[in-house]
Amino acid sequence: MLLIDGKKTSEEIKSEIGASVAQIKEKGGKAPHLAAILVGNDGASQTYVGAKVKACEQVGFESTLVRLEETVTEEELLKVVEEINQNDEIDGLIVQLPLPKHISVEKVTNKIKPEKDVDGFTPANVGRMTLGWPAYVAATPYGIVELLKRYNIETSGKHCVVIGRSHIVGSPMSILMARNEYPGNCTVTLTHSRTQNLPEITKTADILIVAIGKPEFVTADMVKEGATVIDVGIHRIADASKKSGFKLIGDVQFDEVAAKASAITPVPGGVGPMTIASLLYNTLLAAEGKVYSK
Ligand SMILES: Nc1nc2c(c(=O)[nH]1)N[C@@H](CN(C=O)c1ccc(C(=O)N[C@@H](CCC(=O)O)C(=O)O)cc1)CN2
């Protein structure tokens, strides 16, 4: 069984990005600059945004973190987004999700200038990705594509089953795996909470991508012998024996599925760290004007 190590791969990508930044600076260019907006005090979101800021430092990017109170109004948040849209010093902008319930994710996402949308969440970038045009591809699906590529996982003609139809992961993943390039050319089945006979379908998957958001949902009896299994889930489960008070598990029962799979991503250390590496990569593309010319 091949362990697909997202932590190691993300470090490799970050050192490649760091080398590109060093070259830009040597030629007198300015460092790519990422702005992140964090609303409220959600523990996991603070961890992820903190990791993004740290990763920016690691590769030589500038970063700006804007922290807003949980009670911020939608109007105030939209104003901050617009200020960053207009700031020529900033190449990429993300608004950390989830947002408090009184704020419309749709309105906020739609306010982000597509040229700075390094999360790839705006209608413009989703549309361009769907058409196969140059686009910022959402960081988690992009990270998975990169893992499949760097681990030489054969995809052409394979049956890829995606569990979960979110706008951030499942839906774009299904499009990327079907497109006419490597890693892609799969026959894709996109499944979700209303899918009937799910295990019958998952058992036919050569590549199984699980983004259902339910702890240890996928068990060994749902997986074909020799499948590649990509686990997108991250759940914090109380564990008094840990210093943090919790442990992380995925959407897949790792031990029993690993015994059957030919390749599998762990949680933690699989897809999660790739999300951050992909975000940095998109920010580099934004700074270089490689998706939308500057
Ligand atoms: N604006 C965005 N919001 C959210 C996104 C996103 O891509 N853009 N994705 C997720 C959270 N996320 C990034 O923001 C993210 C999730 C997980 C990891 C990660 O490195 N996980 C580690 C474990 C870290 C821990 O929890 O202690 C791992 O899996 O090894 C990074 C980023 C929702 N929101």
Image (cartoon, grey):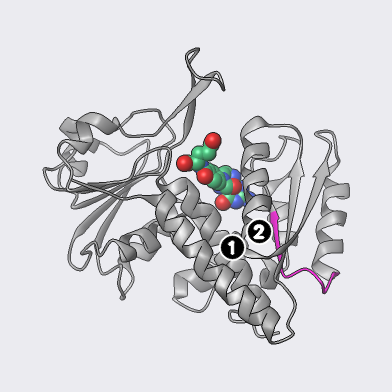
**Tags 2 and 1 touching, CB below 8 Å:** yes
Residue that label 2 marks: 56
Most common secondary structure along the magenta stretch: loop
Q: Estimate the spatial distance between the alpha carbons at disc 2 and disc 1, rounded to whole Å.
A: 7 Å
The numbered disc on residue 280 is: 1
Point 61% across, 34% down: residue = 44
> Which quadrant of the figure has residue 67?
top right
Note whether residue 170 is visible: no
Whole-percent x and y of residue 153?
24, 61
Whole-percent x and y of residue 40?
76, 35
In the visual, does 147 lie left or right of 58? left
> Which quadrant of the figure has residue 102?
top right
In the visual, does 184 lie left or right of 27? left
Point 87% across, 56% down: residue = 79
Point 72% across, 70% down: residue = 91
Whole-percent x and y of residue 230?
32, 47
Span colored in magenta: 87-94
Mark 2 is surrounded, within 10 Å at the Cα level, by few (under 14), some (14 to 19) or many (20 or more) other residues, namely many
Q: Residue 250 magenta-drawn?
A: no
Q: Is residue 202 above or below residue 127?
A: above
Q: Is residue 236 above or below residue 85?
A: above
Amino acid residing under circle 1? Leu
Residue with the most extreme left position: 225
Point 31% across, 60% down: residue = 148
